[in-house]
Amino acid sequence: MSAIPNPRPRFREQLLRVREDAIVSSVNRLLAERGYDQMTVDQVAADVGIAKASLYKHFASKEALAAAAMVRVLDEALAEAAHLAERQPEVAPLQALRAITGWAMRQQLDGRMPSLPAQNSALRTALLGHKGYVDRVMTLSDRLGAWITAAQADGSLDPDLPPELVLYTLYARACDPVLGLLRAGGSYTADESVQWVLRTCFEGLQAQPATQSRSAREQMVAAG
């Protein structure tokens, strides 16, 4: 006997999913543009084009909205990390760390990277009580931590640095305000801005040997 296929979701269920996706997308952008403290539920509802009461049918609070946005970003980051892991050993640990950091920076420039919650904030308290968020942060941190340890072991990353310091530094780069300042100046493209910040993050501010001191544009051309 053949298996009975699962019925397609009813139209109302599909509509609710589309609306919820639109809400989370709006929250992502508003968090990136304004930050958690400046974002309001009224702004989200107006941006999506629905009544505030309708929004509350999907998310019970401002904290729940922010948590959904953070969970989405973490899911995307985990997918990117999994893709890089599949390419090993072709992609070395330090290359993977640089690639995932660059990915996060581009998400920020595209308005899709919410700012990290500040210490002792209401958002941070709410997120720490959100199992889906905490589980994803731990999974991503474990993945990045394994690459950090491997890069320190192979000598491509300073072994004297505490691994958690490196991890926190990479997380901070996802919300680095320097990217926005470079873009606002109008002198560099988004890709050039990302390359400059990646270079200062991974290579520091000291002058590099002549063979490594190419411009960001030359590095991008060489990388294909």
Image: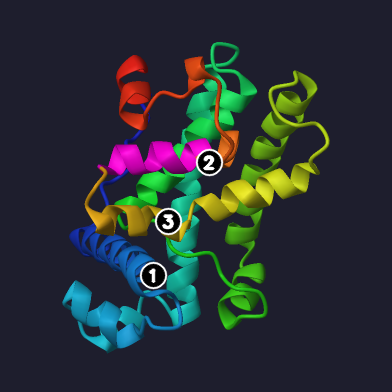
Between the residue at mark 1 and the residue at mark 2, the CA separation in whole angstroms equals 26 Å
Choose top left, top right, bottom left or bottom right for residue 55. bottom left
Q: Give the amino acid at mark 3.
A: Val
**Distance Cα–Cα, label 3 vs label 1:** 17 Å
Magenta region: which residues?
189-199
From the viewer's perspective, is residue 147 above or below residue 163? above
How busy is the neighbourhood of tag 2: few (under 14 within 10 Å), some, or many (20 plus)?
A: few
SS at circle 1: helix
Q: Position of residue 137 (x, y in %)?
A: 62, 52
Q: How many marks?
A: 3
Q: Is residue 11 left or right of residue 106?
A: left
Q: Residue at x 61, y 67 (%)?
A: 130
Query: In the rendered structure, which disc, 3 or 2, sits on the residue that comes first in sequence?
Result: 3
Check contact, mark 1 vs mark 2: CB within 8 A. no
The residue tagged 3 is 178
Residue 88: x and y in percent read 58, 16
In the image, 166 versus 146, the foreground residue is 166
Q: Nearer the viewer, residue 130 or 118?
A: 118
Q: Quadrant of the C terminus?
A: top left
Q: Look at label 2 and name its amino acid.
A: Thr
